[in-house]
Amino acid sequence: SNCIPIVATHDMELTSMGIQEDIDGITLDDVKAFHQELIQSAHKQIYLVGDVASTSIDLDVFEQGNSSVLEDALLDTKITSKQVECSYDGAQTELVLIYESDITPHHELYSAYLVYIAILGQLPSSLLFQNIREKHSLAYSIYATRRMFDGVFAILTGINDDTMDQTLSLIQEQIDSLKTEVNDLEGAKAYLVLQLEGIQEKQKTWSDHVFRNHILGLATDVSEIQEAIAKVTVEDVMA
C-alpha cells in the first residue's frame, strides 16, 4: 500500500517503484513520448571527471533542449504533525519519523547540523544505536538521515509492533538529550571529515559534489566543509 507521510508537493511522498494503478495505465506511446521529452526539452548538465584536457568527446549533440536552470533548488517543506499507518505483508513494523527544520546548506549552523545528525543516528556509537539497539534490543538497525535540499531529517528503524510506544519514547529522549548534553563531539567530527576525504577518490561522489555546488549556487571546496565541521562546538550542536 502507499503512504503519504508529508505534504503532497514533496518528493518524499513519491516511491521510485511508482503506484500500481499508474503503472498499469502506462502505454508504449507514453514511454516513447517521455523519452522524446527528455531528449528535446529536459535541462542537461554534463560533468566530465578525470583527464578532461585530453578528452575528445563531442558535446554538441547535447546542446538542444536546454531549459532554464532552477532559480531556487531548496524545498520549503512544511510537515504537519500526524501519524500515518499502512499495512503490508511482513513480519516487522517499519518506523519512519520525519522532522522539519530550517537548516539548509546556506544556514550558518549547517556544519553543526551535520554533526548533530551524526551523533544522533549515524555513528557506530550514535545515541539511537546505543540506546535503542544495544541497551534495549528494540531494533537491529536504526539510523538518522538528512535531506540535502531542505531542512528535513528522518529516523528509520524496524521494530516489533508491541514495542512501538517504548521505541518512540526512547527516540524522543535521545533528541531531547542533545539540547543539554553532547557526547562524542570529536568522534562525530572525525567521522564526517573522513567521509568527505574520499569524495575526490570516486567519479560519482566528486561529480555529485560539483553538482551540489552548482545547483545551490555555491563554490564550496571539500576542504572548506571539513574546516567548518572541525570548528563546530558543543554550543553549536545544542543550538
Image (cartoon, rainbow, N blue to C red):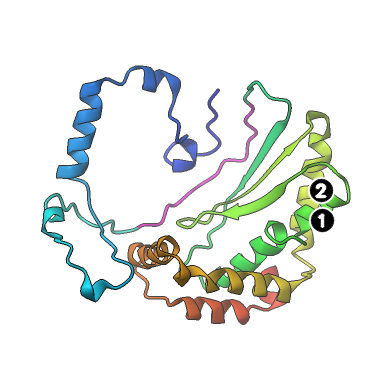
Q: In 3D space, how far apart are the residues under numbered discs 2 and 1 (Cα atoms)?
A: 6 Å
In the rendered image, residue 152, in percent from the top left (x then y), is placed at: 55, 52
Residue for badge 1: 130
What's under tag 2, amino acid-wise? Arg
Question: Which class describes the residues within 10 Å of circle 1: few (<14), some (14-19), or many (20+)?
Answer: some
Q: What element carries label 2?
A: helix
Which quarter of the image is occupied by the N terminus?
top right
**Residue placed most toward the observer, 74 or 160:** 160
Give the quadrant of the C terminus.
Answer: bottom right
Residue located at (14% from left, 49% from top): 65
Contact, mark 2 vs mark 1 (Cβ under 8 Å) = yes
Instruction: Specify the segment rendered in magenta.
Output: 73-85
Q: Main secondary structure of the magenta part?
A: loop
Q: Is residue 103 visible?
A: yes
State yes or no: residue 80 in magenta.
yes
Q: Residue at x 72, y 48 (%)?
A: 142
Q: Is residue 160 left or right of residue 63?
A: right
Check the image and report above or below for 168 versus 182. Answer: above
Mark sitting on residue 193: none
Residue 32 in the image: state x and y as whole percent: 20, 29
